[in-house]
Amino acid sequence: MKKLMGTMVAALLLSGAVARAELVDRVAAVVNKDVIALSEVEKRAAPELSRVNSAVREPQKRAEERARVLKSSLDTLIGEKLMEAQIQELGLGTTDAELEAAMADVRRQNNITDDSQFERLLSGEGYTLAAYKDFLRKQMSRMKLVQMKVSPKVKVSEEDLKAAYTQYTKMESGDAEVHARHILVQVDPKATPQQVEAARQKALKLAEEARKPGVDFTELAKAKSEGPSAKEGGDLGFFRRGVMVPAFEKVAFALKEGEVSEPVRTQFGWHVLKVEERRAVDVPAFETVRAELEGRLRMQKTEKYVEQYVQELRQQASIDVKI
């Protein structure tokens, strides 16, 4: 699913479909003459709000975190509205033929052979087929705008690459990769806070069971994990930093060999990890990682220039924030 959600630069910056505001909603902001409803903001913020509700216990801190998440989501939506206006003004919309070609590419990258399989995969990410098409169409249009307004400014020099490699070698030297297994307790993207907490309690019990003397983690994962790796005993193989989602990675690299973690929350649910083995990683030669480093630098610079571009659009627009 990683390929499904990460086919374009813009997806890292401005992800998600935007629902049209309904008059019955409380207005969160007015961008020029375009309304952003509070329900849009809450929908965009829902996964992060769920994390805050389950992870932050102190009421005042939880309220502050919720306010921060809502503000961040609103800022993102404002940026999207401004970019959409530019897309319309410049005639950069995505045609049906372009959309269908992109959908076919997504299916091909994820080895999807029929619509029902595709719909099941999308459902696991909280999308209907129609909603994902809308999401992808808007992402493609934004990418056209980024290519026109931002991409010409992005330059990666040889000096940039050498500096990035120096930093890369400092980070990789002495680092390790880990061989881990996990047990997943799935959480629906639309789960209530109570359902999230119930899943956490289930994961806690599994972690306790996994630590008992004589318990085979592999067999426990086969029996209890709700993830696709269950039949392999939750085996994730060896991986380096930067491969897994940050919350998962942070815990995996902090564990000692044979140690079992407390439940870790990701967008898929609650994970109980066990590190089987750690081993040192040799730093590859510059030419081996040159293309990867150049891609990272282009991504970083593109993000920076997109942020600047959106700020320029904000300065030129009439924006009235209501919350």
Image (cartoon, rainbow, N blue to C red):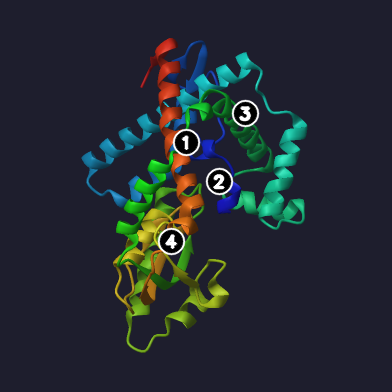
Amino acid residing under circle 1? Leu
Amino acid residing under circle 4? Ala
Contact between marks 3 and 4 (CB within 8 A): the answer is no
Residue at 31% x, 64% y is 173
**How far, Cα to Cα, is label 2 from label 3?**
15 Å
Q: Position of residue 129 (x, y in %)?
A: 68, 42
| Circle 3 residues within 10 Å: few <14, some 14–19, many ≥20 | many
**Mark 4, residue position:** 285
**How far, Cα to Cα, is label 1 from label 2?**
11 Å
Residue at 29% x, 39% y is 65
**Mark 3, residue position:** 141
Residue 6 disc label:
2
Contact between marks 4 and 1 (CB within 8 A): the answer is no
**Mark 1, residue position:** 13
Sequence-earlier tag: 3 or 1: 1
Q: Nearer the viewer, residue 293 or 27?
A: 293
Sequence-earlier tag: 2 or 3: 2
Q: Is residue 39 left or right of residue 137?
A: left
**How far, Cα to Cα, is label 4 from label 1?**
31 Å
Sequence-earlier tag: 4 or 1: 1
Amino acid residing under circle 3? Ser
**How far, Cα to Cα, is label 3 from label 4?**
38 Å
| Circle 4 residues within 10 Å: few <14, some 14–19, many ≥20 | few
